[in-house]
Amino acid sequence: MKTIISPSILAADFSILGQQIQEIEKSGAEYLHIDVMDGVFVPSISFGMPVIASIRPKTALFFDVHLMIVEPIRYVETFVKCGADMITFHLEAAGERTAETIDRIHGLGCKAGLSIKPDTPVAALKPYIRQTDMILIMTVEPGFGGQKYIEASTEKIRETRRLLEEYGLQTDVQVDGGITTGNVSIVKEAGANVIVAGSAVFRGNIGENIDKLLG
């Protein structure tokens, strides 16, 4: 499957964010990963609707919005209005309303992704596997940038890809957390094709870093 790089603006320099987004766009990345954290589902607080709305007119990049918030269904309509192209939310946060949340996102004309934390088994995805446009395997504990990749994630990525193949699906598998130029080939080989990277993109030359991640 085609490899897609989704630079996480959590690691960007916000004093020159517009400039860095332009560099990303020129460098072959297709997505922009936007983490939304509420300080409840995860300890940190990050970007909200105004940031997404303000950068939407500035770029044609696909807005890959990752909700790390409780009861995500409450806010999906607002995020779609702000310019999200895909909304990924956590199975752990939505619970029994997971299927309803996916349907709500699709009903708004947006793609829906489903994410699981490191301790959640891949089997938990089975009831929703045909509904989702993307599966996000968190390869660190969600909530903070700059963490080290959890090695056990590699087998979890493989298991996810095998599960999709069992259902005859070519659904995108995204990885997020601790991805570097040193381990990106490992996650690709395991079956991931959408690569979220923060520090690995924004530290140094953005164009060169993206080239290395694309391989």
Image (tube, helix red, strand yellow):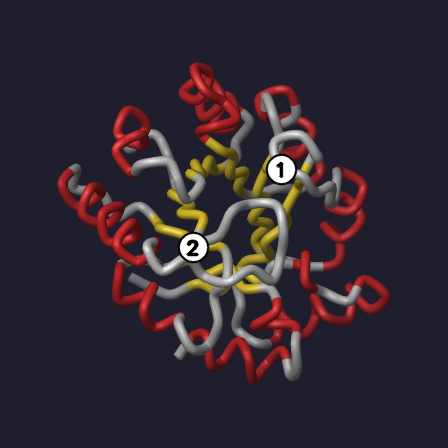
| Helix, strand or loop for disc 2 | strand
Q: What amino acid is found at the position of numbered circle 2 in the picture? A: Val
Q: Residues within 10 Å of mark 2 (few under 14, many from 20)?
A: many
Residue 154 or 102: which is nearer the viewer? 154
Q: Residues within 10 Å of mark 1 (few under 14, many from 20)?
A: some
Task: Give the quadrant of residue 71.
Answer: top right
Nearer mark to the viewer, of 1 and 2? 1
Amino acid tagged 1? Val
Give the residue at x 41% y 44%: 118
x, y percent for residue 14: 81, 62
- Determine which residue is flagged by label 2: 175
Res 33 → quadrant: bottom right
Q: How many marks?
A: 2
Residue 130 in sight here: no
Give left or right: position of 83 versus 31.
right
Q: Quadrant of the N terminus?
A: bottom left
Using the rendered image of the protein, determine whether residue 28 is visible from the camera's viewpoint: yes
Q: Is residue 166 above or below residue 139?
A: above
Compare residues 113 and 198 and report the one nearer the observer. Answer: 198
Calculate the distance from the C-alpha at mark 1 to the C-alpha at mark 2. Answer: 18 Å
Residue underneath mark 1: 42
Q: Which mark is residue 121?
A: none
Q: Is residue 51 above or below residue 88?
A: below
Q: Determine whether the residue tagged by mark 1 lies in a helix, strand or loop.
A: loop
Q: Position of residue 139 (x, y in %)?
A: 44, 53
Q: Is residue 122 left or right of residue 72?
A: left
Residue 65, given in percent of the width and then of the height, sits at 59, 44
Residue occupying image coordinates x 56% and y 53%: 62
Q: Is residue 175 left or right of residue 157?
A: right
